[in-house]
Amino acid sequence: MAILENPELTPLAAAGDPDDHRTGSTWSGPLVDPVSDEGFVRDLCVVLERIAPGERIPLHRHGLDEAIVVESGRVELRLGDETRVVEGRSVAFFPAGVAHGARNVGADDVVYTAFFPSGAIDIEYLERNPAPGTEAEPPQPRTLYDARA
């Protein structure tokens, strides 16, 4: 059994993602079970995030399923052509390959946890929150984040 106690949330802008530059949001992830001689969970990773008021996760898609638990806040979730506003204690499921995004429409941070059935997450942005100086660029090609690398 592994427990990651209180993983540090760091500014998302510090991650250097030219397609998702948010100055008020923080995150930690992808988090995976540390490799140990006693065994470990191989095919699951978690992302912890706080979306600042007015900020959004750009429309994107993954090659695998995702589930998020909205713990608190008021968030507009987009899945394909459907958009819904949900509040804390809600669970949303995003099928592999379907475009989705989120926007904080409340006055407080949206706090959520995302779960992926893999130790690596791919992401393809369809929209951008461009980092300064990259406004005219297209989204980057699909990127793979391997949490075990």
Image (spheres, rainbow, N blue to C red):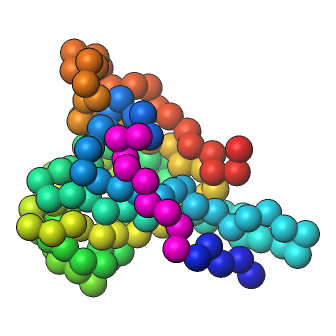
Q: Nearer the viewer, residue 108 or 20?
A: 108
What residue is rendered at 44% in x and 26% in y?
141
Res 98 visible: yes
Residue 61: x and y, percent?
37, 45
Left or right of residue 138, residue 143 in this image = right
What residue is rendered at 35% in x and 75% in y?
69
Q: Is residue 20 above or below residue 99?
A: above
The boundaries of the magenta stretch are 6-14
Q: Is residue 117 above or below residue 134?
A: below
Left or right of residue 91, residue 103 in this image = left
Residue 149: x and y, percent?
71, 44
Residue 94: x and y, percent?
36, 61
What residue is rendered at 71% in x and 77% in y?
2
| Rendered-image quadrant of the N terminus | bottom right
Residue 33: x and y, percent?
69, 67
Q: How many marks?
A: 0
What residue is rendered at 77% in x and 71% in y?
40
